[in-house]
Amino acid sequence: MTEHSVTFTLNGERREARVDPRIHLGDFLRHSLGLTGTHLGCEHGVCGACTVIVNGAPVRSCLMLAVQIDGTVVETVESLGKPGALSPLQQAFATNHGLQCGFCTSGMLMTLEAYLRTTPAPTEQDVRIAISGNICRCTGYEGIVQAALDTASAKASRT
Amino acid sequence: MSGRFFGAAVTRLEDARLLAGKGQYVDDIDLPGMLHAAFVRASFAHGRIRSIDTGDALAMPGVVAIYTMADFADIAHGPMPPMAPHPLLKTPITYHPLADTEIRHVGEAIAIVLADNRANAEDAAAAVTLDIEYLPAVSDAALACEANSPKTHSQHASNIAATMKAGFGDCAGVFAKADHVLTEHFDIHRGGCHSMECRGVVANIDLLTDALTISTSSQSPYMVRRHLAAYLKRDENDIRVMTPDVGGGFGPKANVYAEEFAVTLAVIKSRRPVKWIEDRQEHFVATTQQRGQTWTLDVAFDNDGRMRAIRGRCIHDNGAYAPYGLILPATALASFPGPYALEALDLSIDVVLTNLVPTSPVRGACRPNVAFLLERLADRVARHLGMDRQEVRRRSFVRADQMPYTTGIKARDGSPISYDSGDYVGALNLVLDKIDATNFEARRNETKRRGKLRGLGIASCVEDTGLGPFEGASVRVTPAGKVIIATGASSQGQGHRTAFAQIAADALGVELEDVTVETADTAKFPLGISTIASRIAVTAGSSVQLAAHKVRAKAIAFASHQLEVGEHDLELDGGAVHVKGIPDMKIKLSEIARTLAGNTGVPLPGDMEPDLAATAYFNSNALTFAYGANACEVEVDPETGDVSVVRYVVVHDCGRLINPLIVDGQIRGGVVHGIGNALFERMIYDEEGQPLTTTYGDYLLPMAFEMPRIEIHHMETPSPRNPIGVKGAGEGGTIPAAACVISAVEDALGPDGPFIALHPISPQHVVTWLDGN
Ligand code: FES
Ligand code: FES
């Protein structure tokens, strides 16, 4: 298959790569670039585990082909905090027990990261709708929802 | 038992790494030279393999090898060993690693393709040509019981693999004397586990020694090793099995799977590392499922609402194989009589083979089924007598003053089941109080004014936890003063590392950050059983406690010798042993560990045994019984039939809580799984055994928007049956949840509505019922 070149910004860094047109963004990030923080839970666009941010919007990386990222700005979970210095949203997940097995977590984080940038003061119902495209089988969602609400209100009280 | 950490809601040690995307799940493993596997799977539910032509597929780009069962003949042959042999199953009904001569459900693996990447492997799998003689299939367990039904296994004379019975007391006598008898038919539908991470295996072979290393997304790595070793006729020592981070288990990952065997056989054949990652479509057709059962039950009860006896029969859909023996029907029988102090019980279960994906425990195993039956019957009795549902329960439950209470049922090892402790009526009263049942009618009226129907549901359960025989743990202090715990218990997100660290940190007077926990690597700890049946807190948690206390005693003995102080005058704190009241008179644990690690030619002080370390196994010889009472409120939209759970309250007693944050998380996730079973999750097959719901567009899982907040209240009755007083908590949320939601829906539909004896229910059901049909 003919490979295509793509140029994009990944987690703040400009990158160039050659990609096989059949490869979706999730596989490309995980297996070609070694960014295994993005997870694949269904590969048919329902579970949301694979969510990354492209040009500011949450995107299912299993439904986007890698060739489509040419010229875009891509953010993955690796762009948030590091284990020793978690972002406020990540820290709120830990505090509220918003993760158990951690498999849905990157997708939840990236969905909420994009959401909270544009919706700084959501209600509980808003947050539940925002993550209504992300499945978590472990937590029952409550800790995730609370983490988003806490992050938003902490940010509001800082500004 | 108390300390700085035991009982505290500390945040989890696991979290930082997982949140930063630094988890290490099986698909994150990348080995040099690794091949990628895809399976050729059966697309029909029953057939005989005439031939398999791999010629065209082998010639495709990137393809390295394609194997069928026949290709493994020089290494191994025959069906896989059964996980849980049972005397009623004379011949084990297990898979071959790849189908041998017959395929028995859609999705059964027939051949394994190895290629340089997964896409190429999948392309080639699609190009393998199968010549299959199609055989009639049966997908309904009741039809499968009929004499002229197609046979799931063409060599079997009957689809009924076994009939299991259990009971106690004089059932006929009690039925003859009871004031009332009612009969109901129940239909509980099949669902799946749907861990967000599917299964996966990476296996490798050491080209010099032939030793195998296998990473698998499993709840039972030690069972994988044991059964693989037996199958390959190798010593267990030549096979290392470990679990990396596992993205949820919920039961089905406790099986030893055909794919784990097939991948390993392919590695032995190809002498290359191989990765296989199950995709979601495969998960729907190749990972075990559960809950499909129909029951016909009679209940005998008196005018005062006391339930006295139950008898009846179950048809249990076991799918095409019995990889886990008869564990599900056995669990169903052992889950009776739940919290009810019945005088007699007489049950029989036909275990039926169908051409569907096999069943094995999914969160709760058959306990949710039995809770559904018992709780629905209690509601039915109340309705018949015109009595409050809670009153029937108060009069029928085992009372706190009857503890320990011998139910009359026998455990799997033949010993009588005895509930260790608990207050079932107390839990029910508490949950009714918390949900404010007294003022429910006002809320019902308010909802009615908004054009909706509101219902209150209640359901209770008892859950056997801490299943034997044991887990073990070693605790070791390194010369740097760090504490390393190793255990065979595998984790799938339950926060074991944190809980074990809490236990050890208290015993050794160190900080949580000083403790590292290594789980489920056969090279790091010799034995393990399985993370199933809410057993790890009891078995492994107690082992950590026992081992940590041995280490503590050794550190004290050492310090006593060195400081010339009596052992009773010493305590552990701040990473050191010091004299009580004189914190400066101390020896650091690191120093003790360094000394006991030995120096050339220097004898150890007091001739002590080397190493500041100990291993312990806790034999869980008697089950410990958690219990709970749930109450919820639903709103039903009479126009659309939509049901929403608007409030959910759990009262739960799992003994002492090691970490309330983790326990509450287990309960919440469990309840949501049960709500899914009640309202959403429906695995549908057509008459030919074709699965019709194989995407998350068709098979609905509970999502955030539909789920309520779940309010949890703990009663902490310490278990007398283990050194840390705990009971399991992994399934207690799920067990009564479907029963509770259905109870609420029935209540919402009012006295003219039907008795609801099935789940999941759909909006179509609700609308039909409201129309009076
Ligand atoms: S993996 Fe992309 S939505 Fe599930
Ligand atoms: S934490 Fe396991 S799926 Fe969400």
Image (cartoon, coloured by chain):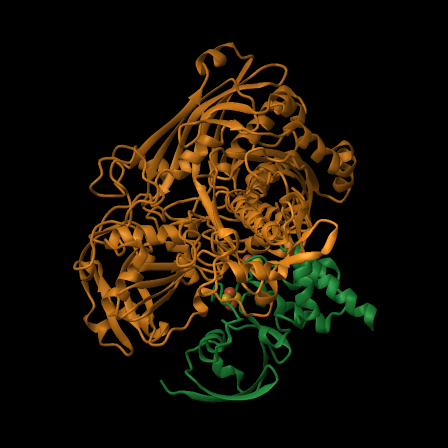
Chain colours: A green, B orange
Camera sees residue B287: yes
Asked if B119 appears above or below B732 in the picture, the reply is: below
On screen, residue B292 versus residue B121, left or right, reads right
Q: Position of residue B229 (x, y in %)?
A: 28, 53
Q: Could you tell me how many numbered marks the image carries?
A: 0
Asked if B232 appears above or below B720 in the picture, the reply is: below
Please identify the quarter of the rendering in which residue B353 is found. top left
Q: Position of residue B146 (x, y in %)?
A: 30, 33
What residue lies at 21% left-to-right and 68% top-to-bottom? Answer: B54
On screen, residue B438 versus residue A95, left or right, reads right
What residue lies at 52% left-to-right and 73% top-to-bottom? Answer: A61
What residue lies at 61% left-to-right and 14% top-to-bottom? Answer: B303
Quarter of the image with the C terminus of chain B in it: top right
On screen, residue A27 versus residue B567, left or right, reads left
Q: Position of residue B544 (x, y in %)?
A: 53, 48
Please identify the quarter of the rendering in which residue B216 is found. bottom left
Camera sees residue B503: no
Quarter of the image with the N terminus of chain B in it: top right
Q: Position of residue A50 (x, y in %)?
A: 53, 69
Q: Nearer the viewer, residue B408 or A60?
A: B408
Asked if A97 appears above or below B768 in the picture, the reply is: below
